[in-house]
Amino acid sequence: MKINRQLAQLVVSFSLVLTGTLVVTTASLAGISISGSVSTSTTNVPLQITTMQYGTAGIDIDLGQYIRFGLNYGVQLSTTSVYQPPASGTNGSASLADLTCPKVGSCASVINKTMITERGSGFTLILWAGEIFMPYVTVGGVTKNYTFTTQVNDGAIEERKGQTPLSVSLGAGLVCRLNRDFSLKMNAQISPGVTMSPGDSTPRMTWDKKNTIGLTYQIR
């Protein structure tokens, strides 16, 4: 599947960059940890299929007992395939009472794809360095790039692109040590995003929210 290949290529590319960074820094720094996660989902409802894939990778370097500097990268791919019934309601809209396709070819096939790449860096302040639990807060910068494509039936693909400027990203979380090498990391983060509602002449800024949980491996 094309979307799987795109995700794999992005994760592999970032892994190579991450490996190169580790080779340079491991010899001189005392504390380095890496983290990553991959998720995928498929949701089916009448006349619509939605698939979502998300992958992240990051590296944190200790600058002391309570401060860390980190780099992270994430990519989100989503595809929605919708079969749009023919216009039969008022004002030329589809009838909400009968959203069915009585036969093959009676509905228009609309495929919408969205790809969001996120690059960020910042500092982590550990509020309490316990033996098991470590609460923390983060502050940093992030940029996001968007690519939207739409295709109706087998027609031409319409593509639109956009991006957010370098903006502040804020977060908080909790690290739970499982053993010497592995920890469970929970994080809640907010960062600027772009939205547009009916009646808006141009896109406007909003806040994106992200909650994650994953494993962290301590290299040294």
Image (spheres, rainbow, N blue to C red):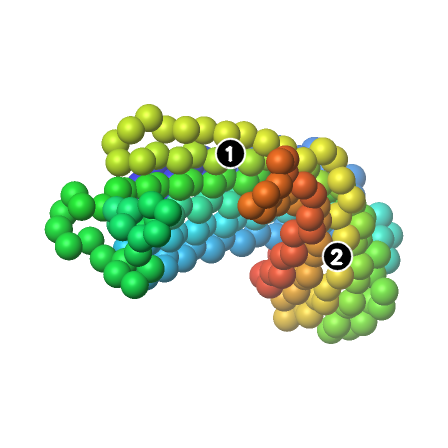
* Residue nearer the viewer, 80 or 42: 80
Is residue 1 depicted above or below 216 in this figure? above
Residue 116 falls left or right of residue 152: right
The image quarter in which residue 45 lies: bottom left
x, y percentage for residue 95?
Answer: 30, 56
Q: In the orientation shown, which residue stands out farthest toward the top?
A: 156
Residue 97 falls left or right of residue 38: left
Q: Residue at the spot x=51%, y=34% of the render?
A: 147
User: Is residue 116 shown to the viewer in this render?
Assistant: yes
User: Is residue 18 shown to the viewer in this render?
Assistant: no
Q: Residue at the spot x=35%, y=41% of the render?
A: 111
Q: In the orientation shown, which residue stands out farthest toward the left?
A: 103
* Residue nearer the viewer, 87 or 41: 87
x, y percentage for residue 154?
Answer: 25, 31
Residue 179 falls left or right of residue 112: right
Q: In the orientation shown, which residue stands out farthest toward the front?
A: 90
Numbered label attached to residue 184: none
| Residue at the spot of label 2 | 171
Q: Residue at the spot x=69%, y=51% of the render?
A: 207
| Residue at the spot of label 1 | 147
Q: For numbered disc 1, what is the local secondary structure? A: strand
